[in-house]
Image (tube, rainbow, N blue to C red):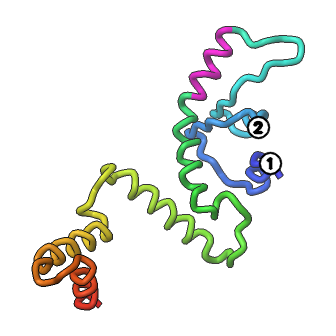
Amino acid sequence: MHDFRIWKESQIEIGEKTELLADKGYQGIKKIHERSRTPIKKTRKKSLSKEQKKFNKQLAKERIVVEHVHRRLKIFRILSSRYRNRRRRFGLRINLIAGIYNYELYLPPYSPDLNKIEQCWSWLKSRIRKCRSEFDSLRDAIEHILKLAS
């Protein structure tokens, strides 16, 4: 079943001021929602003009941001495969995934202060450095620290 058909059957209300940017699969959406833009398709007999190609290219530049978000969210598989859990929790799970994604947007590329595992490794390394001289091998020092931590 195609996305456009699913969208039509869902009867989701879209505000009149909302602008929809859709791909070629959503041809005909303009009849349902006035403020929508889809790429112009070429016909069998007629190629696209330069203006039409320019319009399609500009639309693709705007849509690519959304496509990248879709790709990132599909990593969680809940959006890219059939949902087999209870429907009651679907909205909650989607909101959690969106929250994780939005949280990741605002993290710097490398942020050890915000990453718990980095803090753990830092603590472990500092303890090993302090007691390294007391043991014959590094392995013995690591085992000692891990016993203290557990």
Numbered label tally: 2
Q: Label 2: which residue?
A: 25
Give the CA distance from mark 1 to mark 2.
8 Å
Q: Which mark is residue 2?
A: 1
Residue that appears at 51% across and 63% down: 97
Q: Amino acid at mark 1?
A: His
Query: What residue is at 69 percent from the left and 27 percent from the top?
Result: 39
Residue toward you, 143 or 16? 143
Q: Position of residue 75 (x, y in %)?
A: 58, 57
Q: Are marks 1 and 2 in contact (CB under 8 Å)?
A: yes
Q: Is residue 63 left or right of residue 112?
A: right
Q: Is residue 32 above or below residue 117?
A: above
- Residue 67: give its label: none
Question: In the picture shown, does residue 126 fall above or below 134?
Answer: above
Query: Which span of residues is magenta-colored?
Result: 50-60
Whole-percent x, y for residue 84 in the image:
72, 73
Q: Quadrant of residue 100?
A: bottom left
